[in-house]
Image (cartoon, grey):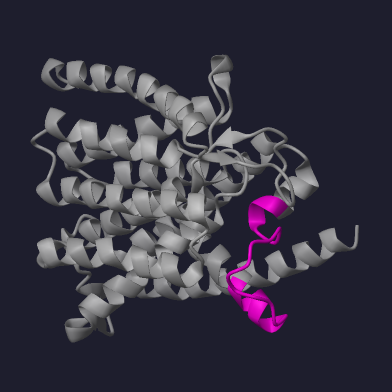
Amino acid sequence: MTSDILLPYIIYVIINFPIFFLTTILAKYLNLLDIPGGRKIHTELVPYTGGIALSICLLLSLPMYPLIPKELSLIISFGFIVSLVGLLDDKLNLGAGNKIVLQIIPILLLLFVDINSMSLNTLGEYGFFNLDLGTFAIPFTLFGVLLLINTFNYFDGLDGSLTSTSLVVLIILFFLSPDENVRLYLLIIISTLIIFLFFNFSIFKLPKMFLGDSGSLTMGFIIAFILIYFANQNIAHPIVLAWSVALFVYEFLSINILRIKNKENLFKGGNDHLHHLLYKHTRSIFLTNFLMALIQIVFFIMGYLTFVFLSPFYSLIFFILFFINFFFIRRAYKYFLSSM
């Protein structure tokens, strides 16, 4: 890292701490606090302003690094709007329908500003066929981003669960990209998430805080559009990018299939998420997060190897087969824990 990059980076990392700290103070004045009870395991009032602090920090990074691709800067700018939607939901409990409508607005705005770069145009070439989206590019992009945003929201139920798994995805993307400016962009997001973990786990006695919906929705939005950028810039094949978020996709589909099968409300909160199941078994937040991160790493390695040594087509087939195996193993694991 050259001096013209390193110095702003050090300054950026340093200013992250007071921004996160100040938002915990502001949360107490505005009553932006998560109340313990029900299925929650914390016992004290905790600020849920981690997401809005994350968004502010990322916005401040943009003028420091003008060489970061414009498309990636736009993702962070519109991600701030998503964080405000999440903060409103945390405060007012908007309901699933209203929350989805408000999520659609920044997605469409970003597509309107830069439709060529931010609209997913193809799902890749697979030897026998090409999955070009054509006129379905915009509706598919809208649906796909909404899906991934809410998939990330499913992972935010235990200290560090969403953050640790998101870090794995960002680190994978970091190594996939040969572009130093893109890598710098990803490093900035990675650094901010690590700093958030200091607060989330109260390391060095820092005030505890949660990401909240403002954080989970924002991370889903940012990573979804980074994946689209990578696909459109031919940085990585779409199926490789799909493997980088395989655990998120598999978990989201598994939960909703099981809820439909059991005639349960798809939008209700519950303790049927993977991190809840693993925590029930391990009784360790650290081990639960480690296992989730490890599962995502293993999924990606297996998918990447099939892509490199077989073909994109076989990698796609393996992606489907891995989901089927994941679903049945997860269901059996859930029933096993229920019988304990």
Question: Which residue does the image show at 37% across and 44% down from the upper left?
Answer: 170
On whether residue 270 falls in the magenta region, the answer is yes
Quarter of the image for residue 137 reads: bottom left
On whether residue 262 falls in the magenta region, the answer is yes
Question: Which residue does the image show at 48% across and 62% down from the upper left?
Answer: 94
**Residue 74 seen:** yes
Question: Which residue does the image show at 39% across and 21% down from the upper left?
Answer: 17
Image coordinates for residue 213, horizontal then vertical, percent: 47, 51
Q: Height in image: 181 above or below 149?
A: above
Front residue (pair 199, 299):
199
Q: Height in image: 44 above or below 215?
A: above
Front residue (pair 295, 119):
119
Image coordinates for residue 301, horizontal then vertical, percent: 46, 52
Position of 212 with respect to 13 (left or right) is right
| Image quarter (top left, top right, bottom left or bottom right) of the N terminus | top left
Image coordinates for residue 49, horizontal then vertical, percent: 45, 38
Position of 119 with respect to 285 (left or right) is left
Give the extent of the magenta segment. 256-276
| Image quarter (top left, top right, bottom left or bottom right) of the C terminus | bottom right
Q: Height in image: 39 above or below 326?
A: above
**Residue 114 seen:** no
Front residue (pair 339, 205):
205
Position of 208 with respect to 17 (left or right) is right
